[in-house]
Image (tube, helix red, strand yellow):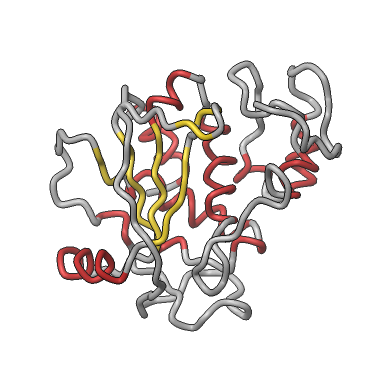
Amino acid sequence: MTTVQSIAQFNKNRESARQEQEEFLSSEEVCEDEPLKGDFSSVKKEFSDQHPEDVVVLPEFGGKYKIVNNIYTPLAKALWEKFKELQGCNPSAILFVKIEEGKKTSCKKPVFMDIGVLSQQWQEIINQMSKRNFTHVIRIYEGNIDKYQQSFEHCLVHLYNEMRKISPDGSLRNYDVQGFTEVISNLKYGWDKPESILPNLIEAGDWLSMKNRQGTLPFGEDRSGENIEAKKF
């Protein structure tokens, strides 16, 4: 599926959602297959493309937790190929789960996406069912995305943030401050508010272009480049 198709599918599949997720903890293992395009000099050799976009065998599933790799894996791969700081992770080994009416909060702020590490138990269970090796899960809280009017462009930055948390050894890293330096330095303060208008991160291709393109869009106060650790959502 192309990025354009992913955008169309993303918009088509925006629906109400619901909270609470299952926790998936620790371990790291990946599969061997045809490698992704890009520089693998800093990535383990076993990191490779297992084509998880078609992992779902029940597309009309009506439960609370929906696997949406068909939408998000192409976007994750596109970000991985554009941004070298993401190349310590394997986008092909991420399971994407949309949580119906998901309205999780953290420190009284809405959570739009979060990432967890799959335990060895869940890796083995999923491998038996899908013949694919997933190491991480990114959960998408659709209720918050709808309530706070997060656009496709917003969600690309949220996706970048979650992928950026994956270290080369598979463990998760914390934000530099209250976000990663690349995001804080190049996006205007309040970029994730409903009224903000963002460029497309994949089309921009790098953070300098992202900053320059955002400067041409209507928004309000330009706080890009500042250390805004004291500011809240």
- Tell whether 201 sits left or right of 20: right
Q: Residue at x 65, y 26 (%)?
A: 233
Question: How many discs appear?
Answer: 0
Q: Give the quarter of the image for residue 136.
A: bottom left
Instruction: Single out the residue that lies furthest toward the bottom.
Output: 45
Can you say whether 81 is above or below 111 in the image?
below
Q: Position of residue 70 (x, y in %)?
A: 32, 48
Residue situated in front as seen by the camera: 132 or 21 = 21
Q: Residue at x 25, y 55 (%)?
A: 54
Residue situated in front as seen by the camera: 138 or 203 = 138
- Tell whether 132 sits left or right of 214: left
Q: Position of residue 90 (x, y in %)?
A: 47, 66
Q: Position of residue 67 (x, y in %)?
A: 27, 46
Q: Residue at x 19, y 64 (%)?
A: 130
Q: Position of residue 78 (x, y in %)?
A: 53, 54
Instruction: Single out the residue that lies furthest toward the front.
Output: 107
Q: Residue at x 39, y 44 (%)?
A: 139
- Tell whether 67 sits left or right of 227: left
Can you say whether 161 is above or below 49 in the image?
above
